Amino acid sequence: MKKNKLAAVGVLGCAAVLAATPAIAGTPMPPVAPPPAPAPEIGAEVSVGYDTKYIFRGFDLGDNLVWGGIDLGVPLTDALSLNLGSWYGTLANDPYDELNLLAGLSYDLGGVELGLGAIWYYFPQGVAGGGVGYDDAFELGASVGASLGVIDVGLGYYYDFEADGSYIELGAESTIELSDRVGLVPGATISYGDDYYGISGFNSVGASLSLPIALTDNATLKPYIAGTWGIDNSGQPDEVYGGVSLSVGF
């Protein structure tokens, strides 16, 4: 350690002497190399959570969902990022397990973000509570999100190859800062299905209210309450549910 420190001091000292000495005529000063560009930082987030009901796109898949997930963000350019993730959930009272593997690209236009992605849904046990069968499915999607003042809006389109149908969802939310570490986030969604697992038409509307609490600079606890209501004779249930999640970023 001392040797490296002394070597650094010696180099700085020589540089100072050279800077103070006038250049000899006809001898150009050596060019100064620019500092290396900082390496892109890979962001990671680990999350775990509990939900009183597993509500997925208006469908009630069961009670008492326990889940965990990992998400990675890899910057490719200043605006383009590669996103990778996995999610695993299980129902405490039913023989139901689900694994999702996700990959996508996001492009930041400055206030507007575009996304393309793919999801593979894998069901190890093949059945959920009540004996309803689930086949593995593959989905492609595209999304656009924008910040409109105090409101963030997003629109997503997803094509499910197993269902041979499409799902479209429009959402909006706003963050109200209650303190430096606590926020209040109301949100709402409306969705539409096109031959999407028996849904053709408007599917459901949803509303949620979450309370993200920054426990540390990297850890966030988020309790929430939400509701979903079927519309347009979709047959979707009306449900009120809630839960809590813990996310830690690296």
Image (tube, rainbow, N blue to C red):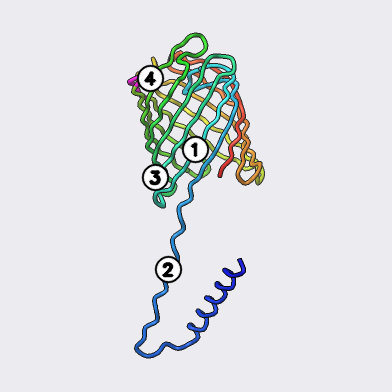
Name the residue tied to disc 4: 196
Outermost residue to the front: 3
Tally of numbered discs: 4
The answer to the question of whether label 1 and label 3 lie on touching residues, with beta carbons closer than 8 A, is no
Q: Which residue is mark 3?
A: 107
Residue denoted by label 2: 34
Asked if disc 4 and disc 1 are in contact, CB closer than 8 Å, the reply is no
- Helix, strand or loop at label 1? It is strand
Q: Under tag 3, what secondary structure?
A: strand
Query: Over which residues does the magenta segment extend?
Result: 162-166
Residue situated in front as seen by the camera: 212 or 95:
95
**Coordinates of residue 199 in the picture (x, y in percent):** 39, 17
Q: Residues within 10 Å of mark 2 (few under 14, many from 20)?
A: few
Q: Is residue 163 magenta?
A: yes
The amino acid beneath tag 4 is Tyr
Mark closest to the chain's N terminus, 3 or 2: 2
Q: Earlier in the sequence, mark 1 or mark 3?
A: 1
Q: Which residue is mark 1?
A: 71
Helix, strand or loop at disc 4? strand
Gap between marks 1 and 3 measured at Cα: 17 Å
Whether residue 49 sits left or right of residue 231 in the image: it is right
First reached walking from the N terminus: tag 4 or tag 1: 1
